[in-house]
Amino acid sequence: MSDFEDEMNEVGEFERQEDQFRQWVSSDPASNFPAEADRYHLYVSLACPWAHRTILFRKLKKLESVIGMTVVDPIRDDRGWAFREGPGHSLDLINGFHFLSEAYLASDPGFADRVTIPVLWDKKTKQIVNNSEDDILRMFNSAFDHYTGNDLDFYPLSLRSEIDTMNDLIYPNINNGVYQAGFATTQSAYESAVLKLFSALDHLEQHLASQAYLVGDQITEADWKLFPTLIRFDPVYHGHFKCNIRRIIDYPNLYSYLQTLYQVEGVAETVNFDHIKRHYYMTHNDINPTQIVPVGPEIKLSA
């Protein structure tokens, strides 16, 4: 993978780079980055599963009027994520950036790694606060509650240990596992990743046979971390990333669970299959050099 050469190891395995901007927005007004309305801006891609998580939390926590959002073009070339006018994406009206890389260089002139999304930008100090979706979810979960009055808690204290354990299963084997399978450059690396992926999916299929959600009897952060991967699985990962032992639709419990999450109020608005499919099939030229985007599959998600 030409875009990810620096993240491939000697045996053909994809090793994702670490997020480098990890400052924190806090409800404490004395903190370096206090939670304030209309101070922070979210740069996202509707195609990216990591960004999708933050879009979900912004929607579900009723933060649209508190935190602005700009969507990049789903088609990424060698210049990286770009701000262009188009269906579902736009120019950057906050800073006038043409490329997201400009935000990284404005925050750290020496930044030389891969530019990733999402990005939480501070309009006041004109810098990236955080580019880790894990951190952004936790901030969105509680830091701005005094502005919105929204008391939904996707990381409740009583379930944190179980949520963390579930996240530790989902991230390496499923969320990142599809990428390790898709970006592998050797047969052994691919097979190792894809077998771990389906072992984890098989485990969750059994887990969901006896409960509606991953942890406890309520929707938590763990569910919203899994959802963006599941919603992309049959349209993209099954074919494009060769994760083709089974589809999500072939798992009765996982498929029903996916439908349940999709039908939560506001969630369907965060899913854009056009952006998702065009991004993967037209950006990863090493995997799909023709850039032909599949028409299907048809997936029944609504009631």
Image: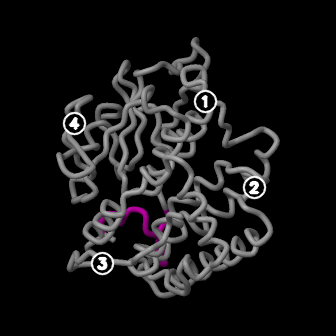
Which labelled disc corresponds to residue 215? 2
Q: Nearer the viewer, mark 1 or mark 4?
A: 1
Residue highlighted by disc 3: 294
Residue at image position (20%, 32%) is 96
Element type at mark 3: loop
Q: CA distance from mark 3 to mark 4?
A: 32 Å
User: Which image quarter holds the C terminus?
Assistant: bottom right
Please tell me which of labels 3 and 4 falls first in the chain. Answer: 4
Residue highlighted by disc 4: 97
> Is the C-beta separation of discs 1 and 2 under 8 Å?
no
Between 104 and 257, the residue placed more toward the observer is: 257
Residue highlighted by disc 1: 150
Please tell me which of labels 1 and 4 falls first in the chain. Answer: 4
| Horizontal and vertical percent position of residue 79 | 21, 53
Q: CA distance from mark 2 to mark 4?
A: 40 Å
Q: CA distance from mark 1 to mark 3?
A: 39 Å
Q: Examine the structure image and report whether residue 122 is included in the region drawn in magenta.
A: no
Circle 3: is it few (<14), some (14-19), or many (20+) Cα within 10 Å?
few
The magenta stretch is 2-15
Between 10 and 177, the residue placed more toward the observer is: 177
Q: CA distance from mark 1 to mark 4?
A: 32 Å
Q: Quadrant of residue 124?
A: top left
Q: Is residue 95 left or right of residue 55?
A: left
Residue at image position (49%, 44%) is 54
Question: Please, what is the three-letter code of the amino acid marked with disc 1?
Answer: Asn
| Horizontal and vertical percent position of residue 256 | 62, 69
Image position of 168 with respect to 103: above or below: below
Q: Is residue 92 left or right of residue 9?
A: left
User: Which image quarter holds the N terminus?
Assistant: bottom left
